[in-house]
Image: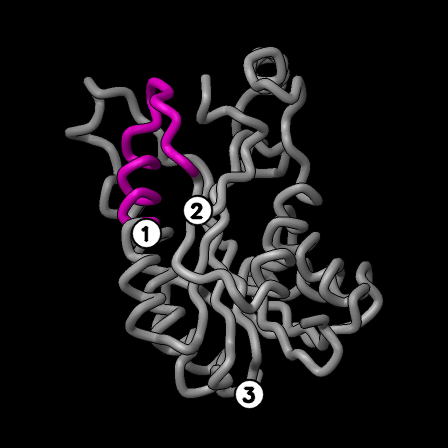
Amino acid sequence: MGMDGRHVAVIGASSGIGLETARLLADRGARVTLGSRDRGRLDAAVKEIGGGTAIVVDGEDAASLRAFFGEAGPITDLVITMTRRGGGALAADLAEADLEGAFRGKTIAHLRAVALALPTLAPDASVTLVTAGSYSLPGTAPLAAANGALEAAIRPLAVELAPRRVNAVSPGVIETGWWDEVPADARQNAFKEFAQRVPVGRNGQPHDVAQAIIALIENGFVTGVVFPCDGGLRLT
């Protein structure tokens, strides 16, 4: 399909996977609108990728999302990468964990963004969400629940919104700022352990996931899939 003439909105574009996706889209000739909460980081992202439009948006606020799509105007493709940081909890702590927040920041935010984007989405549009796969890791039940619920919505959305296409990319362990809240020593130990565990022998980088997102946007014959981009972590 190619990216010339495409206008792609990326929500969650100021860092990590979203920023790298916006960069690759721009490199392929797409017009990119970047959305995120932080104006300073958004402006820096636009400067870093060498172009694009920055619009501040709070993905957990319906009015903010409406304003974002209203300002962005007609779009041919939507990419949603936003997520809350943290949110894990061991089973014994689930009664006190912020389970509602986990769902608001992921499942509800993504589904609401899809709904509010519909008036601006082209008839042949693609929608690509970024989830986070469930890999039976202790302490990740809230994250697995929120992301699993979102992944379960992909197939019915693809049927309902056809001929628009709806897909998701499910990353494994990706070395991004999402991990910054973990103490440095623990973070590095975790990265080392995961790299040794996965078949490809390394952790993912934002570029790996961005390439998977671009592939789903460009392939007009793929819809209703959750595409794993995890280095084989799901196999372990």
Q: Earlier in the sequence, mark 3 or mark 1?
A: 3
Identified at 45% across, 69% down, the residue is 165
* Residue 143 is one of the magenta-drawn residues: yes
Q: Report helix, strand or loop for mark 3.
A: loop
Q: Which residue is mark 3?
A: 74
Identified at 24% across, 33% down, the residue is 97
Q: Which residue is mark 1?
A: 150
- The answer to whether the residue labelled 1 contacts the one labelled 2, judged by CB atoms less than 8 Å apart, is yes
Residue 214, label in figure:
none
Compared to residue 88, the image places residue 76 above or below, namely: below
Residue 46: percent from the left, percent from the top? Answer: 75, 66
Quarter of the view holding residue 58? bottom left
Tell me the CA gap for discs 2 and 3. 25 Å
Q: Which residue is mark 2?
A: 131
| Amino acid at dot 2 | Thr
* Residue 174 is one of the magenta-drawn residues: no
Q: Nearer the viewer, residue 41 or 68?
A: 68
Identified at 56% across, 81% down, the residue is 75
Name the colour scheme. Answer: one colour
Q: Earlier in the sequence, mark 2 or mark 3?
A: 3
Whether residue 202 sits left or right of residue 158 in the image: it is right
Residue 231: percent from the left, percent from the top? Answer: 59, 28
Magenta residues (range): 133-151
Q: Earlier in the sequence, mark 1 or mark 2?
A: 2
Image quadrant holding the C terminus, namely top left
Mark 2 crowdedness (10 Å alpha carbons): few <14, some 14-19, many ≥20: many
Image quadrant holding the N terminus, namely bottom right
Mark 3 crowdedness (10 Å alpha carbons): few <14, some 14-19, many ≥20: some
